[in-house]
Amino acid sequence: MAVDIVVPAILFLCMVALHILRLKELNPTVKMAGDKYEIGAAASFGTRTVQQDYFGVKNNQGVLLMLLADGIGANGEVAAKLSVDTFRDLFNDPNSINKPQYFFKRAANASHKRITNTLEERQGETSIAAVMVKGEELFYSLIGNCRVAVLRNGDLVPVSEGQTIDVLAQHRYNEGRISKQETLDLLSKHRLYNVLGQDSFKDIELVSAPLVLNQKDLIVLMSQGVFNTLRWVEIEEVLSRNSSPQTLAEEIIKLVNNSPMVDKDNASIIICRRK
């Protein structure tokens, strides 16, 4: 009986230790081309027993890449790590910083192939948000349903939309491809229609033109466990405080942990401030 208790406890502690190591990968201050970007990150298991979120940051010649993956399914944590590792590996190519959209597409396709080849018959999928910061310009790509947002003058503005059925329905209605009633029927469905590792993967959400950043802007990447647990105004209120990105990230995750919601997904957030 004692062994039955001890083994799961050891496995749980190992998972916690691994997640702490993931957090330590994020250097709180990244020097780039004479500027400084402060970065903070925090995460929670929610009510899950496995942490399937994974993130990373990389600097290539003064250009910053931030990644947040939200794994899905039995092998979601593997898919999430493979996607982040693939994006970071390909970011070493000099063309990556010269052609951001080409990089995002190439990295997404390479990640999908690596996930399916590694897992083969074992299913494992992941969403991923990728943000590249070149000086004052922000580029992003998204597959699945993470979120990218920018806090400016106290307002938290969503940059990404997410690849869910309701968003897809709204686009198709605006294009005249489905009726109003068909749109209404689909708007309540928030299921993902496109993720890495999925047989039907084919699309990537890309920024059409770079967003020009202002000084003191906060760049925020969130997994579903954050924005599905907290109201947008709650997130905005915390991020508007005059604290370090690390402190803000920890405060957001503290709110998630204190939420009375019964079923909470893994929650992860990366916050970057342009000084």
Image: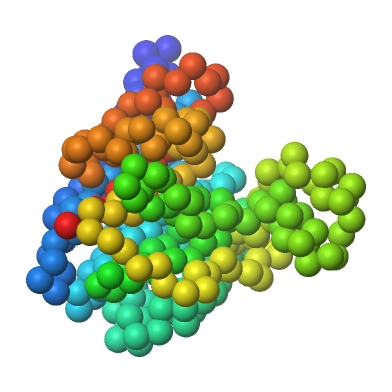
Q: Residue 95, position in %: x, y?
A: 35, 87
Residue at the extreme front:
153
Which quadrant of the structure image shows residue 184? top right
| Residue toward you, 261 or 210 | 210
Is 135 positioned to the left or the right of 122 in the image?
left
Total numbered badges shown on the rendered structure = 0
Q: Residue at x 63, y 56 (%)?
A: 163
The spot of residue 241 in percent (x, y) is 25, 35
Which color mode does the image show? Answer: rainbow
Q: Residue 113 in the image: state x and y as whole percent.
A: 55, 72
- Left or right, residue 263 beside residue 46: right
Residue 50 shows in the view: no
* Residue 166 visible in the displayed image: yes
Quadrant of the frame with the N terminus? top left
The quarter of the rendered structure image containing the C terminus is: bottom left
What residue appears at the point 45 percent right and 50 percent down from the top-left corner?
A: 157
Q: Measured from the top left, where is residue 147 in percent x and y?
A: 48, 51
As drawn, is 189 to the left or to the right of 35?
Answer: right
Going 38% across and 59% down the picture, which residue do you hit?
67
Q: In the image, is 216 to the left or to the right of 162?
A: left
Front position in the image: 80 or 172: 172
Front position in the image: 227 or 191: 227
164 up-or-down from 103: above or below: above
Q: Residue furthest top?
A: 1
Q: Which residue does the image show at 56% across and 47% down from the upper left?
A: 72
